[in-house]
Amino acid sequence: MEATSSSSSFQKLEQMVTQLAVGKEGLLAQEVNTLLAGLALQGEVLSPGDLQSVSMFLEESSLGRQHWRQNLTSLLQRLATTLRWVLQGQPTPGSTWGYLVIKACLQVFQALPKDMAPLVWSTTGKSETLQSLLGLLLEVVWEKTLNKDTRLLAGTALSMLVNTAPQPQYGASAVLTLFQLPSQAGTGELKFGELVVEVPPVLESDGLEKLVLTRGLLTCCKMDILSCQLEGFPHKACLLLDMVFPAVCALIREQKNCHYYCFQACALWLQRLREGLAALWHLTGTHILAQDTKLLQEVSQLLWNNAETPVEGVSEFIHSSFRLLLEIYHLECQHFQDQERPLYQQMLQRVVSMPWQIKARYVPLCTIVPYMGSQQVLDAYPDLPQHLLSCLSTNHLCPAAAEVYKVLVQQQCSEWQGGQQGTEVALAEQWAQRWLPLLSQALCSPLPILQSNTANHLLTWTLRQLPATQALLAAQFGGQDTMSLRAWVSLLKAQKSVAGALPLGDEALERLSRCLGTHEEGVRLAALGLLCCSPNTNQPLSGTEMQLLQEFLPLNLNCDSSSFRQLLQAAVRKALVRLRDSSLAQLRGKAPRHSGLAGGAEQLTLAVGFVEWLLQLSIASLSPGSNYQRKKTALLLLAAVLETCTDTWSPDRKKGQPPRTMATLLSYARQSGCWDFFSQPNLLALLSCLQDSTNEIRDLASELLVRYFPATFPEPIALALFQLAQDSLGSPRVQEAEAGAVLIKTILQKSDSGTMKSLSLEAEAALTVPSRGLCFAQHLLHVLQAQYKVACQDLLRAAATTPMHGAIAALRRCLLQVPEVAISMQAAELVQSWQELLTCLVTTVRDITSLLLGALQSQQGPGADEQAAAPSFAEMGNAIGSLIMLGKGQGREEEEGDSVLLSEEHNLILTCCWVSVKEIGLLLGGLAELLLSPSMSAELGPLLPLPTLQMATRVFQEILLRCRHWGAVEGCSMGFTKFCAALLNHPDPELQAIPRAVLEQGLEALSGPRSSSITRRAAGFPMLFLCIVSGEAPVQARPLLTHCIQTLLTLATTALPQDWDQTLDLPQVCALHVLQTLVRGAGLGRAVLCHATPMMALALQGLGSPCWAMRNAAIQLFSALTSRLLGQPWSHRDGCPSEGLSLHAFLGQHPKLGAVLLGELKVATAPTSGGPRLHPALHAILTLLAQLQPGADSPSRYGGSGDACASAKGSCSG
């Protein structure tokens, strides 16, 4: 019973119990009956655990099925009671209770069909309980409040109940009744077999119920039911052809939010059609997919119209649908002995007529090849090799092109072998005639993307299929130029991955050395990859390979390219894994035998020596005089060494853990005087990196220290580091303050109770607080409060000597980036202390925010009144000037009056304000994300009470509404997005209401009159809305986003006043800027596309506004919409854009938007009384249409849009 949550565990346990109970079967059956009978009393609700037990015993246990067969009525009663309770809304939102009870119903219908049949289809045996359960299942199908998976499972359960029909006609009649249910609303009763269910008077359809029923039938309904003749139709009709297929077509046209399941239903329909071909031929007596049949035309059009759908997973269903369609057509042609098969040629012609940039054309092309033959396809499509080259230079088209190449080559090999029975060499020569120029050109191309894609996707596969092609390819790459060297290395690497080992002669080694020393980074990396990689991780490096690496690595530590450094680290890591695994194999006595390699002891010595050399090289490159590039590369190499050659376990990683026998190798190396990874010189070298001026160096060094080095620092080092960190936190330079924050976090993670007593922390916390994290947080909060007091008295002095951003950054790192701190927050004895500290912290940062933003508006203190908008740059300059004069006295005003450069004091105040505000936003957002997450237990009370969260909300509002500096706005926005997401996804309704209230306040403020201008695309105001709506869970319907956009659209379409003041921002203009921000928001993705049509209509309308600000905002909204609708442009080749969206696909995805564009084009091309006049929106529309790829069909296919475009062009030229 305890294993019912795991199918595999349950199966094993049942097998064990069955074996142990041999000869005592009766006793075992009695025990099972006792267990199952005690799940729930008659009429009681089954718990989720009970439901899992019911399902598991039905699915996996013969004794369980026997028990439920004997107690079927009782089980159905319990399931009906539970499902009724679920539909009344008793479980908590997001519960799986409903899904589990539907699953149990499904398995009852599936496991006990003979017992269920009389309850449904017999007049004398029909069950009132089952009748009630059927009504509840129908409610689930139409119940919009339940999640999609539960409703889909209910459709499968109904189909499984249909399968219990004793005769196919009975089941078909029941299905027909279900499909006609929406038209029967309020008519009284629905008859399902002998069961009679009352039809609800009103069925509020959301369209998903049709998908639920259709997908359920296609998933599991018996073929004899789907293919039997329906009564009452004028022709020989059946469910599969005359009911289910029209439903699938309607779903794909209507259900834009369920693309994945709709196309899954389409693929399932074709699969069931293939299964039932014999029965359908017998029923109809003719072709199902004859060339002139409406069915073939509709299926083909359905697939072609949606072949470019960008929804994830749909392309696989389209691919399988094309394959099934051609397979069915082929079977029919064979069955009816048709010699003419025009569908193949028509499909190929359509593929050829489409531009090569359209990815969808390659799916049917792969499907056609086996039926037409490779030669016929290549003859009809002579440009295919060149188009494949173009695709290989475009990342998103590369997999499709590789698949076409593989299908064609496989088909050619099959044809050549069948016709000639040739040898491997003959096959390779045949291949070379068609494909050798293609691969040679691609591998020798100056485009790195084309080289790498060809090597990765085509070259290795070709060598596996046709090994004899290696010699032909090698002959093409014998030159000494860079491209030939790159291609040669790629060929050797592919050959090594296929063969496993690649012995190199003297000439090849000399050429490889030349590749390692060339100035081209791509060639060097390829040669390095050849040295380091191997199909088997326990294949040792040869002495020559180690020597080449020792010559190569010191010369490549100063590379400027970040990608080069990352790839260098990845290659060296592979080499280290080989050294480690081969050494462990030697120590175990199971080393693989490779000719030409050194003996076991010598090999171990070489491996240990190489790792020691690499360690010393990395440490030496971390000296303070080294540049950023050398330090970063050295740290990456050191990380690879520590990750590979230590026994440190990383709990957060699923792969890459050290081998269990790693201690044996470590002991061997240390006996040799090597691999002292954690020596004091190595520790000091990494500690020096913590003071680096770049955060990448600091963070990586800190990560290595925390993850791999011993748990605590030596006490003298810890004390010196703490003093250095204290000094750095008080520096006005941002880099030094951030270095101090990293030092503080690292000390916290590498100290113990003994170290804590030695540190000079504020107050008596170090002696009384048992948690190191709480102790450090209290100390930093005291430091921050002291700095705030100085700032209240003299902001200039505070900015120069005690800026607050360092302490805030240290608090953020210690509270959010140290796992032990999060654990201590859940300790019962510390909850109250943490609550007090966090409340005090939020209060302090609120006061700091008010002080800093008020200072930039010539207002001091937390009680300053908030302005409706951010101050202008001139106002901020005047305010800062006043602060400087207050801090320095009045005597130097004249001296600095004529300066056109910002003074040092001016920069100090600006830095202190903006960086502190940014850090506050990141801190508050991270705290909400951490403390409101489901992993944090709420049993001891919230660590951030409601008043504290409301206070933090006001801080975010103040920053976003009163700040103009984009860096501060961006940092605050990141924090506010996390803050809103944590609140909106929290189960407490009071917390969920906070972002909603802020959104309403923002919309109200947006529509009101303004006393000043915020300019610059509404400053930080739009980010307020973006952060809130981005916090909504993506799986939900996003009601806040819908409400926000609809309100903004209404505001933006309001007529402009007769006498607007162009020095102030109009609400309509601000609404357009907010919409533009929402469209560009990366967190919203495709969610905003549901509202693309009204926004596009608004943007086009705004282009004709008499107000310049309105036209400016409209063109920015139009540009954002265009990027979101078409996606970002892919890579370019020879100046030609390679976006893959055609006009037809665009109009298919956004049919209403097509009507808007066409309406504007008609207005633009309509004759006017005053002669030709350029329509304001015409240029924008033509720009949008020009970015689409042409389709395979004539313009007449799209209705009047083609003619309207032509007329518009004529008007422009006139």
Image: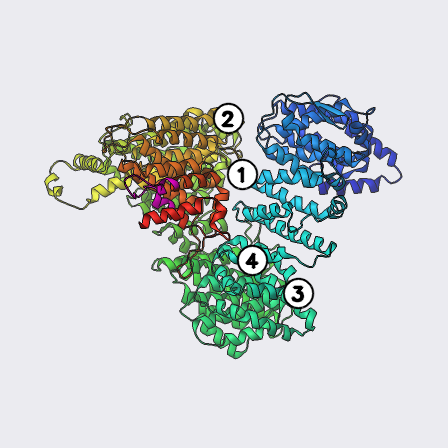
The answer to whether 1012 appears left or right of 272 in the picture is left
Q: Which residue is mark 1?
A: 256
- Does the stretch in magenta take in 335? no
Mark yes or no: residue 553 visible: yes
In this rendering, the answer to whether 501 lies above or below 322 is below
- The span picked out in magenta is 1162-1181
* Residue kind at label 4, given as amino acid type: Gln
Q: Please give the label number shown on residue 560.
A: none
Mark yes or no: residue 6 visible: no
Q: Label the magenta part by its dominant secondary structure.
A: loop
* Residue nearest the viewer, comparing 235 with 792: 235
The answer to whether 51 appears left or right of 607 in the picture is right
Q: CA distance from mark 3 to mark 4?
A: 63 Å
Q: Which residue is mark 3?
A: 589
Residue 448: x percent and y percent? 45, 63
Q: CA distance from mark 2 to mark 4?
A: 60 Å
Q: Which residue is mark 4?
A: 349
